[in-house]
Amino acid sequence: MRLTTAGESHGKALVAIIEGLPAHLKIDLEKIGEDLALRQSGFGRGARQKIERDRAEILTGVRNGETLGSPVTLCIFNKDFENWSSCMSDGACDEAVMLKKRLTKVRPGHADLTGVIKFEQEDARNILERASARETAIRVAAGGVYKQYLSTLGIEIGGYVKEVCGVKDTGEYTFGELKKAKTTGVGMLDDEAEKLAEERIARAKKEGDTAGGIVEIRVKGLKSGFGSMMTYAEKLDARLAQGLMSIQAIKGVEVGAGFAVGKTSGKDIHDEISYSEERGFYRETNRSGGIEGGMSNGGEIVLRAAMKPIPTLMKGLNTVDYLTKERATAASERSDVCAIFALEIIAEAVVAQVLADVVSERLGGDTMREVTERYSRLP
Ligand SMILES: Cc1cc2nc3c(=O)[nH]c(=O)nc-3n(C[C@H](O)[C@H](O)[C@H](O)COP(=O)(O)O)c2cc1C
């Protein structure tokens, strides 16, 4: 399966083309809409979310609610384009508006400076429009399709926010308990931690500052043997890490015990193997996060991703104006203070994309009947 996304933050629309979906996958647009709404919510989001009410439309590949086997095109029209058409149009733009919207006080922590140099631009808007995390809206829509593909096989994805700017949710939760995270402001499960995290974000906002955090993503129902140790490119952990690292602002990814593996000895970190008639091969612990040797081992997949604090601060960071070379305060367009709740939804979508790809590689199948039959035959 192949995913291509396109679109600028204030352009006409965001688009995704998914190739390789089998025929007869039922597509529930309403469910996709629920994820899109969640991506726009959460404590600490900025004003843009009030303008957009993201709704995905299907342009190709689906008829009467089912995929045809042809490429599926999804589209989200940007409402904000109405306000930006004079300087974001594909035709001739209004020079005066373009000048007004030009961004030369390049923002630290963004693609602005490296991008203008690399792509020989004078206006960092030509860089930030694509670098923006607005792109994640269409990845969430595509992720909704992938989730529906996985769900027909009994593979479910959930997650929650584990940490915000040093405030930790230290609880241990079952997969079933993760649902509650979608109903809270920050996305934590522990009420006390949630309250402290909200206070921490509110303080950052008051101080013109921003906050980062860590999310945990879990996958239930993936049978063993997906991914492969045969080549480096096929390793499941490597592919999931690549997917998660491709999300804007992600600076760290952990699988299972993650960085803790470097701080302990072998007897405390590996999952010893047992066998019984009823359970077959099993492990009492899951420190590997459900992946050994680049393959799923049948346990829950456990991943964590760390998001840096939003790099646009209302109390702007020091920078240099790209054109005048004079010292300046970085541009501060309306911005999120913390987007960790959204990140959890985006990370689920990205994990769904990687897993759907890995599953379809192993199972193939032109129709969903073929896919489900082949999956059910696996041990
Ligand atoms: C859901 C989400 C929302 C974001 N919102 C903003 C924002 O409002 N303002 C901002 O400056 N950066 C925001 N970012 C982060 C930037 O997009 C990101 O830091 C930037 O593109 C540079 O990429 P890098 O951090 O991966 O190097 C957001 C990221 C995500 C995932």
Image (spheres, rainbow, N blue to C red):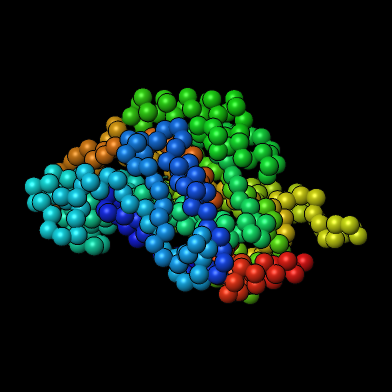
The location of residue 322, given as percent across then percent down, is 18, 50
Extreme residue toward the right, this view? 277
Is 251 left or right of 266, judged from the image as shown? Answer: left
> Residue at the spot x=24%, y=62% of the render?
119
Residue 177, compared with residue 150, is above or below; it is above
The location of residue 208, given as percent across then percent down, is 33, 29
Residue 172, compared with residue 298, is above or below; it is above
> Residue at the spot x=85%, y=61% of the render?
280
Extreme residue toward the front, this view? 64
> Residue at the spot x=38%, y=57% of the render?
75
Q: Which of these two is toward me, 227 or 154?
A: 154
The quarter in which the C terminus is drawn is bottom right
Is 265 left or right of 346, judged from the image as shown? Answer: right
Is 270 left or right of 81, judged from the image as shown? Answer: right
Q: Which of these two is toward me, 84 or 168?
A: 84
Q: Which of these two is toward me, 112 or 93?
A: 93
Number of marks: 0
> Residue at the spot x=19%, y=59% of the render?
90
From where the camera sits, is residue 20 visible? no
The location of residue 170, given as percent across then percent down, is 64, 34
The location of residue 39, given as percent across then percent down, is 45, 43
Extreme residue toward the left, this view? 96
From where the camera sits, is residue 19 visible? yes
Residue 22, compared with residue 27, is above or below; it is below
Question: Quadrant location of residue 92?
Answer: bottom left
